[in-house]
Amino acid sequence: MTDQTMTFQAEVARLLQIVTHSLYSQKEIFLRELISNASDACDKLRFAAQMDASLWDGDSELRVSLSADKAARTLTIADNGIGMSRDELVSNLGTIARSGTGEFMAGLSGDAAKDMALIGQFGVGFYSAFMVAGKVEVVSRRAGEPEAWRWVSDGSGSFTIGEAEQAGRGTTITLHLREGEDEFLDPATLRRIVKAYSDHIALPVVLLEAGKDDETLNAASALWTRSKSEVTEEQYKDFYHHVAHAFDDPWLTLHAKAEGKLDYTLLLYVPTMQPRDLFDPARKPALKLYVRRVFITDNCEGLVPSWLRFLRGVVDSADLPLNVSREMLQNNPVLTRIKQAITRRVLSELERKADKEPEAYAAFWENFGAVLKEGIYEDAEHREKLLKLARFRSSTQEGWVSLDDYISRLKANQTALYTITGDQIETLKRSPQLEGFRAKGVEVLLLTDPVDDFWLAQVTDWQGKPFRSVTRGGADLDQIEAAADAPKPEDQGEAVEGAALVTLVAALKTILGEAVRDVRESARLTDSACCLVAADGDMDMHLERLLRMNKQLGMLGPSLRILEINPRHPLIRRMAERAGESGATDALQDAAHLLLDQARLVEGETLSDATAFAQRLARVMAAGIG
C-alpha cells in the first residue's frame, strides 16, 4: 500500500500554527508531554493484558526509551505500550477527537503562553513536539496486530500515513529538530529534563547511548506510594501535569493512605483552571483507578460522584481484584465504600479551605461552584454540607456570600431566604421584582446557574428559613420594616387608589382575558410600571423557560402569569384616568397589551405576535406625538 496524504482537521492546523511559531519560554515541556503519553500507553497495555495475556507477546518489561542522534539531529522517544492502529493514528494525531473543540478554538487568543496553557488543558500535548521539530515521524504497531504504520508531518497542514516495519508493539516518535534546538541532543539536558518533569513516572525512562549501558533517568516508582514527607511540592506539581495533561498548577493537593477495613491510597488534585470537559453532558469523572499499582481504567464512574468530576489524580486500591472489569466495577461494594470515603474527605478539605482561605476558596467556587451545586440537587446525603460550602451573588453585597452570611443579615420579621434565578447577574440586578426588596434593604440571592432552579425545588429551608422566589406569589414585604434611609412610598408619586384602581384592574382583566391569570396591585414595584409573577402553586418562570427551551414540556402551553401593576407609576396613573373617562377604548386596549408585552420582554420571553406589538406601539407613539 502506498503512503496516503491527508489534511489535518482545521482545528489541528490552527493549533500547529500556534505551536510552530510559539515563543513559549519552556520548550522543554514537549519531552514531558511525549513521555507522559508513552506512560499512558503502557498503562493501557497493562489493563488490556488483564483480559488478554497474549498481548504481552513475551515482552512484559514496560519502559520508555530516549535516544539522540547528533549526526542526523534526531531525538527519538519510544515505548512498548499498547501502540496504535492505522485508524487510531489518523484519529489521534490528525483530529482533536474529543468534546469541547468549539470551546478550545474560541479560547485561542494569539498569546503564545496562554495558548500553550490551553493546548495542555485540552489534552493535545503531542503537538508541542512541533515547537522544536521541523518534522515528526511516528511509527506504531498496536498490540496483537501484525502491521505497523508510519505517520509523518512537518506541521504545515497535512500528514502522510503508510505501512512501516517494527519488530514489536508500541510507538516510536522521531523528532527531526529545527535549527537552534541542538540542546535536546545533549544527554545532560535530557537527564535534567526527565528528572525535573518525569521523575514520578512509574516505569523506567531509559537513556540509550551508543557504547554505554542503558541509564534509567527517573525514580521509576509510583509517586502516590511514597510517603508525603518524601515528595516535594514540585514533584506533586509535575505529577499533576502528567496525570491531568494540564499546564496549570493544582489549586489543592490531597495525598492520603487509608488502612483498616479499606486499604487504598489516593493522590487527588483540584485544578486551578476548569478542565476542558467540565460541562460535557456525559459528566464523567477523570480519576485513574489502579489496583496494587496496576492501571485499570481512567473512566471509573463509581469512584467519585459526577459532581466531583473536576478532580484529577489517582486512586490505588489493594482490595479490588486485578482482573476486575469495567462492568464489575459498576456495582462493586468496595468501590462504593471508597467513593463514600473520598467524597467525605474532599468535602472536609474544601470546608477547611473555605474557613481558612476565603479568597482562594472564592476563586475555586467561581470555577467549580456550578458543578458542586449539582450535588445539592441529586445527593441528599451530602446536601447539607454542600449547602454550607455553597457561595452566591447577592443584591446587596459585593463578592460571594454564604447562606450563613445571609442568615446573619436577616431583617426583623423576615421569614424567608429570597432568591431570583436568571441567565445574567446584571440582568437580575435590574429586575423589577427586586425593586421593593431593594427599597427595604432586603437581600436577595442572585442565581444564574441552570442547576439553581432544580436544587431549589429539592431544598426546603436553611436553618429553618424557607427559600422563596421573589418572582412567585406575593412579595411578603408588608411585615418587614424599611431601612431608615429608604425612600418613602409617597416620594414615588401619588398612587391610584380606591375606585379608580378597581376600575383599571377590571378593565385590564377584561382586555387581556386569558392572556394572564390575574391582574393586581403590586407590593414589590417601586420604579417599574409592571411585572409578571408566578402564582404560588405554579412553576418558577425561569425554570419553565429553561425546560421549554430544552423541549422538556412536551405539548404544554405557557403557564398563565399574574400581571402586577405599580399604582404610583405615571403610566399606570394615566391608564387609570383613561379607564375612568371612557372605559376600554382602543387606546387603552393597545396600552394594556403593550404593558403585558413589556413585562414579557423584561422577563426574557419572546412575544407571541411581534407584528401586533409593532402596530400597537406605532399607534401609541403616534397618539403621544400628536
Image (cartoon, helix red, strand yellow):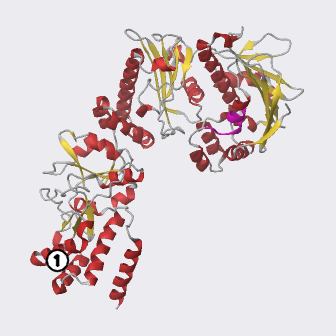
Taking the image as shown, residue 582 lies to the left or right of residue 175, namely: left
Q: Quadrant of the C terminus?
A: bottom left
* Quarter location, residue 452: top left
Q: Nearer the viewer, residue 416 or 483?
A: 416
- Say whether residue 124 is visible: yes
The single residue placed furthest to the left in the displayed view is 498
- Please name the residue shown 14% across and 51% down the image: 412
State the image coordinates of residue 392 (x, y, percent, origin top left): 34, 46
- Say whether residue 521 is visible: no
Q: Quadrant of the N terminus?
A: top right
Instruction: Reply yes or no: does residue 254 show up in magenta.
Output: no
Taking the image as shown, residue 105 lies to the left or right of residue 172, namely: left
Q: Which residues are magenta?
A: 89-97
- Please name the residue shown 20% across and 44% down the image: 466
Q: Nearer the viewer, residue 549 or 446?
A: 549
Find disc 1 in the rendering and name its residue: 494
Taking the image as shown, residue 545 lies to the left or right of residue 242, namely: left
State the image coordinates of residue 81 (x, y, percent, origin top left): 68, 19
Amino acid on which the number 1 mark rests in the picture: Glu
Q: How many marks?
A: 1
- Above or below, comparing residue 445 to residue 565 in the picture: above
Q: Nearer the viewer, residue 369 or 42?
A: 42
- Above or below, comparing residue 50 to residue 139 in the picture: above
Q: Secondary structure at mark 1?
A: loop
State the image coordinates of residue 343 (x, y, percent, origin top left): 38, 26
Classify 10 Å Cα crowding around label 1: few (below 14), some (14-19), many (20 and above): few
- Above or below, comparing residue 608 to residue 217 in the picture: below
State the image coordinates of residue 366 (x, y, percent, origin top left): 43, 43
- Please name the residue shown 33% across and 86% down the image: 624
The single residue placed furthest to the bottom in the displayed view is 626
Instruction: Reply yes or no: does residue 90 show up in magenta.
Output: yes
- Above or below, comparing residue 332 to residue 616 in the picture: above
